[in-house]
Amino acid sequence: MKNRLRELRAARRWSQADLADRCQVSRQAINAIETERYDPSLPLAFTIADVFDLTIEEIFLPNRADTTNDPA
Amino acid sequence: MEGLLYLRAMVKQQDQVTRAARRAVLIDGLPVATLGPVALALGSDPDQSAVQKAWWIAATAVFALAVAWVLLRAFRRADEYLRKVQLESMAIAFAAVLVALQVATVLDAAGVIQLHQLTQLILIGGVAIWLVIADLRTRLHR
């Protein structure tokens, strides 16, 4: 799943550690989400959205090309 | 000098969760790191008296409980990503212990080695594999 975390974080001049502290997770988790190695759980996605004062859809973008269960 | 500055920057960049986790692992890890070799040393004598066996069993039981306690605390402390890393590392270590035990059992049946001498080493090796993989995975993906 693609996301705009790095871009949003840079716009606010926050480090990964700053964002991690605000979301109450480890910096490794933020790094893994930013580099698309890990998709956050729904509660964490809501927390991230709250921190940026945006909706989940404005931060996380589904990778439609990866959808293999699509019957069409 | 540049290396020192980089290290300082990395330490400063550590978040509160990571700092707390590393501090707690150090505090929790000390009794386990001490008890492991003690249990191993107590069980190394093949001709043990009943008292020596009792000490060995007691030390091994305390070691096992300490490992379980450290595991439980680590899982409760970790966030969802670190928990996933820990579980995957444990799965690899578990597979390694299973294979090593199977090989040791076959070699024991063939009379090449004595299984009871190796069992504890294999288990300690499994814990070491788990910790090393989990640590490398979190360190390499900075």
Image (tube, helix red, strand yellow):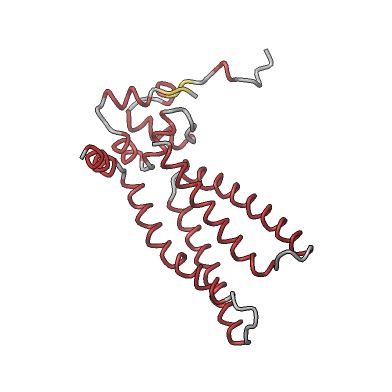
Q: Horizontally, is A33 left or right of B111 in the view? A: left
Image point (50%, 43%), residue name? B85
Q: Percent from the top left, x then y, of residue B13?
A: 28, 40
The residue sitting at the top extreme is A72
Q: Percent from the top left, x then y, of residue A71?
A: 69, 16
Q: Horizontally, is B17 left or right of B108 in the view? A: left
Residue A51 higher or lower than B48, as above or below? above
Q: Percent from the top left, x then y, of residue B28?
A: 42, 62
Number of numbered discs on residues? 0
The residue sitting at the right extreme is B110
Of A10 and B58, the residue lying toward us: B58
Q: Quadrant of residue A19?
A: top left
Image point (41%, 29%), residue name? A34
Of A40 and B88, the residue lying toward us: B88
Q: Percent from the top left, x then y, of residue A16?
A: 32, 34
Image point (24%, 28%), residue name? A13
Of B131 and A59, the residue lying toward us: B131
Q: Horizontally, is A30 left or right of B53 in the view? A: left
Quadrant of the image containing the C terminus of chain B: top left
Of B107 and B130, the residue lying toward us: B107
Residue A64 higher or lower than B107, as above or below? above
Residue B52 higher or lower than B67, as above or below? below
Quadrant of the image containing the N terminus of chain B: top left
Image point (46%, 22%), residue name? A2
